[in-house]
Image (spheres, rainbow, N blue to C red):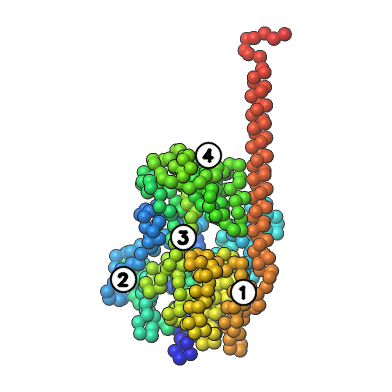
Amino acid sequence: MADMPVKRVAVIGAGPAGAITVDALAQEQAFDVIRVFERREAPGGIDEDGEPTPLSDFDSLAARTADPPRAVPSELPARAPPAGPAAHSESSIYPYLETNVHGLTMEFTQEPFPTEYSAWSARMHGEDTPFRPWRVVRGYVVSLFDRKGYADLVSYNTTVERVEKIGDQWKITLRRPEGDGDYWWAEWFDAVVVAAGHFWVPWIPKIDGLEELEQDQPRSVIHSKHYRGREGYRGKRVVVVGASVSAADIAVDLTQTAGEVHSINVGRNYNRYFGSIAVEHPKIHNHPTISHISGRTAHLVDGTHIDNVDHIIFGTGYSSSQPFLPQVTVRNNRVIELYQHVVWQRDPTLLFVGKVGAGLTFKIYEWQAVYAARLLAGRGTLPPVEEQRAWEVARIATHGDGTRFMAVVPDFEEYFETVRKLAGDGAPGVGRKLPKFRPEWTDAFEEGHQRRKAMWARVNAEARAEASAASRGKAKAESKADSAPSEGKRTL
């Protein structure tokens, strides 16, 4: 990009990926304009949103087409009737939600992660618990924007509706609520960094009868991102679908209040880190896949059924969605043509931070942000397009052409060191400096998983012991009742 100076950069998203991207860009001291667009009212990327919008149009959710682009006014700027919030933009937050990975793995290298923890976490994991309440995470991200005047760079309540290349400039079409309608306008940039996350649109498999159940009983069918805590399910019969982290967490949480908890996970691939231990709780009934729904009955593929279902909660993942980028292709739920998960091969002035999964994500965001900033400042290394394409082809051969393509685990060190070398040290005295990969990061990552597994094992054992004691007590009471004299019968 040395032949085309980049002076105006747009960043989409003010969550953790956006926060570190802004700092990486600012520290390069190479740009005249850095603008951040965030559709929520504050930074952080997460918040309590109250009651979620009821689900509808289940066919589009199953087909991964539930977040289509909005029509843009033919002339800008413009005022139009309110379009409302973006589809499925609620946060996946409930009041007592905690992180499920070690705090060290969420820490950027120059910004220590808070050590504040909850009483519940200390009780379950010890006083040295590595897990943090969700508010601590949000506060951490907010603090990154509050420093150095970065908050002044952000336009909040602003939705990016279209990003398109016109000539050698990127035109970004924007919308925000204003008065009793929406105000639409456009801004122009030399480069765009997409740091808006990629998984906010829920994916729910196609199941005959599911939409009818939701229509008959509104809010009876939700996705895990709409879960707002266990109290709303007290005494209810709840079916939780999914074999990974969110489904397991919710199923275990519901054992405290629900009348019955049924988990649809048999025959599925459990999360590679946690396995099936969470759903081995004695109050959780495990089943194979749902074949169809009739009324309030969930019919299963093995011929059995669950009657009188009150709620079905899907912890079945998300659909990759960026409707504001019509020129970027999503295939098999991943954005294709990204070199090192960062650079769009067709145009290196469009970059992504956060298109990865499976651990150490905050630290990976930092490496990606620094690489993106170095490239835009003309100080990083970008191989020829042919080599970029060859990297993607090779990765498809080893990781597949789906979401596993985005999983950095277990090759953390290789990825971190590759990106660090491509970013380089930059110019003297400016830019964030990336340290060499440290094995203690993955050690902490693994320790966090072992802590959670140990907690689940302990809770399960306690629940089994409690159930056994209750059973013995009941048997003893029944035996005593059987041996007691009948009323009015004389004994010798």
Query: What's under tag 3, amino acid-wise?
Result: Tyr
Expressed as whole percent of the image width and height from the top left, the position of residue 139 reads: 56, 65
Which of the marked residues, 2 or 1, is nearer the chain's N terminus? Answer: 2
Expressed as whole percent of the image width and height from the top left, the position of residue 98 reads: 58, 57
Which of the marked residues, 2 or 4, is nearer the chain's N terminus? Answer: 2
Task: Name the residue that disc number 4 marks.
Answer: 259
Which-is-in-front pick, marks 2 and 3?
A: 3
Which of the marked residues, 1 or 3, is nearer the chain's N terminus? Answer: 3
Query: What's under tag 4, amino acid-wise?
Result: Gly
Query: What's under tag 1, amino acid-wise?
Result: Glu
Give the distance between the C-alpha atoms of the residues marked 1 and 3, in whole angstroms. 27 Å
Label 4: state its secondary structure. Answer: loop
Q: In this view, does 154 lie above or below 311?
A: below
Which of the marked residues, 4 or 3, is nearer the chain's N terminus? Answer: 4
Which of the marked residues, 1 or 4, is nearer the chain's N terminus? Answer: 4
Horizontally, residue 255 falls left or right of residue 332, namely right
In the foreground, 465 or 127:
465
Q: In this view, does 225 lie above or below 26?
A: above
Q: Residues within 10 Å of mark 3 (few under 14, many from 20)?
A: some
Which-is-in-front pick, marks 4 and 3?
A: 3
Task: Name the residue that disc number 1 marks.
Answer: 414
At x 46%, y 45%, the residue is 301
Task: Name the residue that disc number 2 marks.
Answer: 72
